[in-house]
Amino acid sequence: MTSPSLAVRALALPVSLALVAAAQGLLATRPDQQIGWWLLLAAALGAAAWQAGFTITDWTQSQGRQWGLAPQRWRRITGGLVTLFGAALWFDATQQLSADWGANFDRAWLTWFVATPVMSLGLRLLQAPLSPARNRLSRWEWAVLVVAFAVAAAFRLANFDNFPPPDAVSQVEELQAGQFGTRFLTGDRGRWEFMSQAAIAGLGIWIGGPTLRSVREVFAVVNLLKIIPAYFWFRALSGPAGAVVGTALLAVSGWDSIINRIPGHPDGLITMCCLALLAGPAVRGLWAVYPWVGLLAGYSTITYIAFRPLVGLALAGVVVANLARISNRNGANLLRVVAPTLLVASLVAGIFIPLTHRLENQFTHEYLNGWNRARAQEDYYGPRDSWSSILSKRWERTAQAVGLFYTQGDSNPVRNVNSRPQVDPVTGSLMLFGIGYCALMCLRGFYGLVVGAFGVTFVGTVIATGNFDPLRLQATIQYVYALAAIGAGGLVATAQRSFGRAGRGALLALLAAGVLGSAYWNGQLVWDLWTSPVTRQHYRSDLAYLSVWLRANTVGKQVIGLIPSNANVVFQENDASWLLGGAVRGTAAWDVHETLRKLSELQGDAVLLLCTPTMLRDGAQYFEYILPGLQFEFRGEETRSPTKIAYSSIATPAIAADSPLLRDGACAGARARFELRDEHEKVIESFTMTVPFIDTMTWPGAVREAAFRHEQAARWIDAVWEGDFTITEPGSYVFLPEFYEGTVTVTIDETRIAGGNQVPVALSVGPHHFSMKGRFNALMIEPTARLSWRREGGDEEKFNLVPFYRLAAADPRCSAAAPNGRAPQAAGSGG
C-alpha cells in the first residue's frame, strides 16, 4: 500500500477529528437520524488517509532488552533439568485431575500453580540478555499508572455501603456466586465452568462473612487489578502516549465500574495479563513467560464461553511474538516459532484434558451449553428462514449492537440510566480510529489479532446469539480500550510527524481534555446509577431481602411465613441459602389458610411473617382482625425497597388458632372455586374454599401444587369468586379488578367491570351481590387475581382490598369443615 504524503496526513487528521466530533454530537442529540452515522463512516474513511502505512510504535521492541540462549553450559543443563521437572509436575497434575476431578482438584491446581513458576525459572536459566538495554517505565509513566489505578479504585470501590443495595441483587447470578463460594469453602469441587468464580466468592465470604457485599467487593478488587497489565499491553501496541490515554479511559469507565460490582468472572484480568506477556517479554524473546501464558490460556478453556477465544488468541500471539525475531524463514528460524507454540499448546491441553474425563458422555452438551442456550431463539434462528430473512435479521441486530457504543446502551436500569451508550463519546471515537488502524495494519504485529479478537467476541456475544443481552458485551471490554489506546497513539504519532512538537503538544492537550470530559461523563453515569430510585426498584430479590432479614432477626425462633411468590422457597435449599444460614428455622405458606393451619400446629412462641410487594398492610389488617392482640411491624417501605415485609411475634399460636374468632374470620368472605383444565377444557382437579379477600395471598397453594403435578397436561385455571356482602355506609365505590397472566371480569350487582378498569358503583345500605370470573395460565407459578376498591370522593385515593371477611357472614359450609376452630383448607376433587 502506498503511504499518503505528509500533506495529506496533515489535512486528513483535523478533518477526521472534526467529522467524528460532529457525528458524536448528532448521535447524542438526534439518534433517530442517519446523518450522524454517515458522518461517523466518513470520519473512519478519512482517518485511513493518515493511518495507512504509518507506524505508531516499534512493536518488535528492537531497542528493548532482547533474550537469547545462555552461553554458560551449567545454566543450560540446570535450566533444562528444572524445566523438565516443572513439566513433569504439570502433567502429573493432568493425570491426577483426569483420574478423579473431585478428590484431586485442590492437589492438581496447586501443582499447576507450583509447576508454572518452576518451569518459568528453568526457562529463565536457559537464557541470558543479549544487550544491556532495560525495559523500564519512565517516572512520569509510573506516576500516571499510580494515579490511574487510584482513580479506577475510586470508581470501582467507592460507596459500597450504599450501592449496590446490601439486600438486593441485579440478577440471580449474584446469589449463585455466593452459593458457589459457600460450597467451595465446604469442600465442593464439582464446578468447572465457574470454578474461579466459586474460589473468589469463597475468599470473599471467608474474609468478610456470608454477605452480598463480601462477595461483590472481592470481585471488584480482583477485576480492578487489570488496570496494571492493561497499561503494559496498551504500551506495546500504541506507545506511552496511547497507553496513558487508553488506561485513563479504562480507569474512569462507568461501564467497567458497574460490571465490576456484579460478581462474575476474572477473565478480563486473565486476558490482560496473557496479552501483556505476549506483546512485551515474549516479543523480546523471553521464554520464561510461556508457562504463564499456558496457565492463563489453559484456564480459559474451562471458563465462561465468551472468554474461551483467548486460547486461539494466545497461540496466535505466540506465533506473532516469535515472528518478530526472525528476518528470514529458514528451518532453524521457523523452529523458533513452532517450538514455543507447541509448548504453550501442550500446557493448554494439559489443563483441558481432565475436563473431557470429567464430562465424559456429556461433554458436547455441557461444554457448549451456554452457546446452545444463547442460540435457542426460533424467532431469530428460524429453521425455515430464507437467506434474505437471515441476512435481514443479522443486519438489524448488527445495527442494534453497534448502537450500544454510540446511541443506546444497555436498557436494564440496574446497569444503566436512561440507556446511555456503553462508552463515552471520546472512547467511542478513539475506538473507531483504533479499529481502522488495526484493519489497515492487520498483517503487522498484534494489530490484526486485536481487531480480530474484538470482532469475534462482539459477533459471538451480541449478534450470533439469539437473545440480545448487552451484559455479554463485557467480554469485549479489554479489546475496546486497547483499540481506544491504539487510536490515541495513532493520533499523537501522526500529529508529531505532521506538525512537529507543537502539533504533538496540541493533540496531547486535546486528548487530556477528552479524558477529563470522559471522567465527568462516566462519573455522572455512576452517580446517577447510585442515586436512581428506578435502579433501586429494579435491584431486588425477595429471596435475598428475606434471607438477610431473617438471619439478622429470627435466629433461634420459629417462623411462619406467608410468601405468595418465588421467595416461598426461602426455608428450603435455594440460591440464597448461604445468606440465610443454618440457624434459622421456619416454614412458608402460599395462602392465608395454609398459614393459619401451620400456625395451629406450632408449640411455643413464633414469628408470623408476611412478604408480598403489594397490599401488605391489607394482609396484616386481616391477621390482626382474626388474631386480637397481634400487631405487625413493617420493613422495606422506609428504604424504598420493592420487597416489603410485615412481622409480629405471636404467643401460643396453637391456642390462638383454636379460637372461634379465628374460625369466623377465616370462614367469612367470598366463596371461590378453582378448576384446573387441560387444553381440551377437561377438568383435571377442582378446589373450593372461602377467601377473606381476593388477592395473591388467597390464591390457594393447593392449586399451584396441582398445576405443578399436572404440568404436562394442565393448560388453564378457571376461577370463580362470588357471594353477598353488606354495606353499612352508602356511597359511590370505585372497584378495580386486576390480574396477571390471565383475564378477569367482575359484576357488582348489575354493573359489569372488565379487568384493569376503575369503575364507580353506587352502593346503598344493605346486601349486595358480586361475582368475579377469570382464566389464568396454569404454567405460571404466580397467577394473580385481585379485587380492590376505594370510596369515591374520600380523603384517600389509595385502593384497598375489598374486605369480604368484614362484609360477609361466615359461610356455614366452611365452619363445618373446620372442626375445633381449626383453620379450613381448600376442598379438592379430581376431574
Image (cartoon, grey):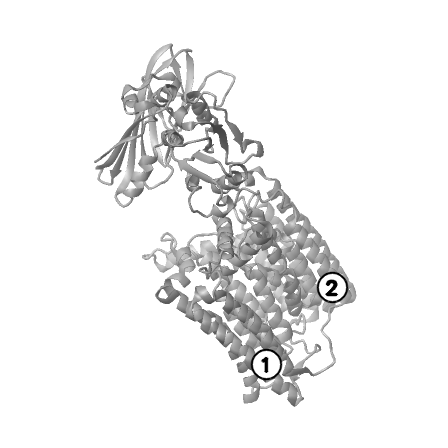
Percent coordinates x, y for residue 407 in the rendering: 56, 49
Q: In the image, what residue type sits under mark 1?
A: Val
Classify mark 2: helix, strand or loop: helix
Read off the residue under disc 2. 142
Q: How many angstroms separate mark 1 from mark 2 (CA)?
A: 34 Å
Using the rendered image of the protein, determine whether residue 345 is visible from the camera's viewpoint: no
Q: In this view, does 739 lie to the left or right of 177?
A: left
Using the rendered image of the protein, determine whether residue 13 is visible from the camera's viewpoint: yes
Q: Is residue 700 left or right of residue 438?
A: left
Q: In this view, does 62 lie to the left or right of 168?
A: right
Percent coordinates x, y for residue 148 in the rendering: 70, 57
Residue 472 higher or lower than 574, as above or below: below
Read off the residue under disc 1. 82
Classify mark 1: helix, strand or loop: helix
Q: Nearer the viewer, residue 35 or 599?
A: 599
Residue in the picture at 51% in, 68% down? 107
